[in-house]
Image: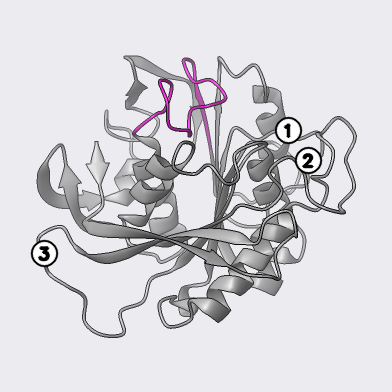
Amino acid sequence: MVTGPYTVHNKLYEDFHMDPTNFKIDVWTPTGFHNGTQFEEGTQFPLIAFNHGLGGGGVFVDAYSNLLEGLSSFGYIVAATRACLVGCWDSGSLKGDPSGYKDYYKQQLLTIDFGKDKLKAQVDISKGFGIAGHSMGAQATLFSSSGDNTSKYDIKAAVMHHTYTHTFPVPTIPFLAFTGGKDATASTKMTQSFYNGTGAYPVRGYVNRADADHMEPCNGKTYNPLLPQFTAAWFKLHLDKTPTMLATVDGKDQMVDFEQMIFGTGKQSICGVFLSNGTPAVSCSI
């Protein structure tokens, strides 16, 4: 298990440009190093905009805090909207999906705008932006990573966790998609449909863990504590382009090679590691 070198602070903001169902945005920010060393004045970090799944907004202490705090510890400002808990205020619906989520992806784009505006002293916009999400939030991430959204918002990389979707645009940026053999909500075929879609960005990854259910990214008994390191590794390579970092591996500080973590073939790589409970990925393609 790998953890980032940074201590992290969580703060709740409001932005009245968000959907009126909820104006609040949770933000996790690196505040210093685990050894007690503080940052130099003006230190900035890339921003990752995260979208929750159905029912996941507004309960981050109970839902996604482990994943998002862990991700932030690798040197990211992670901003997560609370809007659209059970659907957005006035957006339509897509066939087969819960109502109110047709335009949910726009909250992710608005979160990027929020970061550029309200967090501009802390956010390193020169690196571009990362996006991630779970379930309906992963569908939002799929939509945000396709079409002209990536160029308009300077989005460089995406990570989807257990995507729920019946619409399959293909991402135009490097993307990593997680699914699971025990996911009875979002089938593996949903992820396969955009992963294998014609024109999907050639640098992509697919991980189907046999023992993972739909709640793999959420706090609880089926949470996979290795998700933050693999999610961060993807962004390290494709967002801030930092292939190595001094991090903590099983309690000891050492240099971590994110290139090997993602593209390697060893037991600690994303396709080689036993992701949890001794159960390997049933299917993994990078």
Dot 3: within a 10 Å radius of its alpha carbon, few (fewer than 14), some, or many (20 or more) residues? Answer: few
In the drawing, what numbered circle is on residue 36? 3
Q: Based on the picture, tell me whether residue 7 belongs to the magenta stretch.
A: no
Q: Secondary structure at mark 3?
A: loop
- Which quadrant of the structure image shows residue 228? top left
Please indicate, yes or no, whether residue 229 appears anywhere in the rendered image. yes
Among numbered discs 1 and 2, the one appearing first in the sequence? 2
Tell me what residue is drawn at x 12 percent, y 69 percent: 37
Alpha-carbon span between mark 1 and mark 2 = 6 Å
Dot label at residue 32: none
Tell me which amino acid carries mark 1: Ser
Location of mark 2 (residue): 168
Three-letter amino acid code at the position of disc 2: Phe
Nearest to viewer (mark 1 / mark 3):
3
10 Å neighbourhood of mark 1: few (<14), some, or many (≥20)?
some
Label 1 sits on residue = 193
Question: 66 and 228: which one is in front?
Answer: 66
- Crowding near pointer 2: few (<14 within 10 Å), some, many (20+)? some
Colour convention of the picture: one colour
Q: CA distance from mark 2 to mark 3?
A: 46 Å
Discs 2/3, front: 3
Sequence-wise, the earlier of marks 1 and 3 is 3
Q: Are marks 1 and 2 in contact (CB under 8 Å)?
A: yes
